[in-house]
Amino acid sequence: MATRLLIVDDDPEITSALIRGLSLHGYEAQAENRADRALTRLQSEAFSGAIVDVMLGADSGIDLVRKARDSGVALPILMLSALSEVEHRAAGLEAGADDYVVKPFSFEELVARLRVQEHRAQTHRPEPARLAPATRTLSTAQAEITLTEREYALLELLAQNAGQPMPRGDIFDTLWSAEGSSNENVVDVYIGYLRKKLSEADFGFEIKTLRNQGFCLQGLTPLPEEP
């Protein structure tokens, strides 16, 4: 299966060349030319990495990377630019980019840098957590937490929509509306409970609050369930 990459660049000739060249090295590359759309896709779709140009018309690739990292996007990101000055490279790396490639570049160099970042991401990926419905426990080899019935239902709902923001109202309607007496604030309360328990160990994912969008489980690989 090809590795999916998102190319964020406002130059159609460059994106077309990157898509063609990367396909020859086993990558399935897709393109976005606007920072806002790229951010939404990075937050909601399953990409293995991204290549982001520093200059995106009126937008900034550096700002895009910073917003992506702040919202919990953890995939490898390479920045691409004709700007070779040290301050531009430093700004991109400080924003959260993993590497910086200066134009003009060779595909061999670009692919080599992508491979390095993919290897690092795999090496540092924590052991997948296991979810046991019968006991409502979430565990790794190093840690285990026990969830209440409602915490478990909330985690399961977020996991079913991993990588995509769920509005507070949708969560409330699914888990609480039938009770009649609660209001949507109960969602925030239980998100807090769940976050506190998840902070006890590195389970490889976290619950992010996306402004005006809702809550999103980021960094999740499918949770294997125990019988």
Image (cartoon, helix red, strand yellow):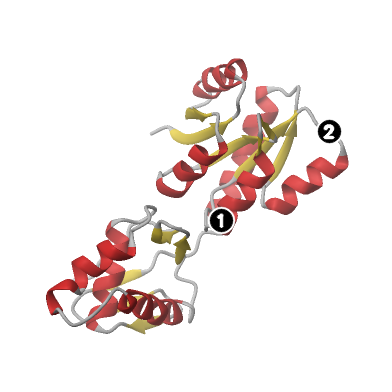
Within the image, what quadrant is residue 154 found in? bottom left
Q: Earlier in the sequence, mark 2 or mark 1?
A: 2
Of the pair 87 and 173, the residue shown nearer to us = 173
Question: Local crowd at mark 1 within 10 Å, few (<14), some, or many (≥20)?
Answer: few
Residue 89 disc label: none
Proximity of marks 2 and 1: CB atoms separated by less than 8 Å: no
Q: Secondary structure at mark 1?
A: helix
Q: Is residue 133 above or below residue 28?
A: below
Q: Position of residue 144 (x, y in %)?
A: 38, 81
Of the pair 92 and 76, the residue shown nearer to us = 92
Query: What residue does disc 2 label?
Result: 84
**Does any portion of residue 224 appear in the rendered image?**
no
Q: Secondary structure at mark 2?
A: loop
Q: Is residue 92 above or below residue 132?
A: above
Query: What residue does disc 1 label?
Result: 123
Question: Local crowd at mark 2 within 10 Å, few (<14), some, or many (≥20)?
Answer: few
Residue occupying the point 71% across, 22% down:
106
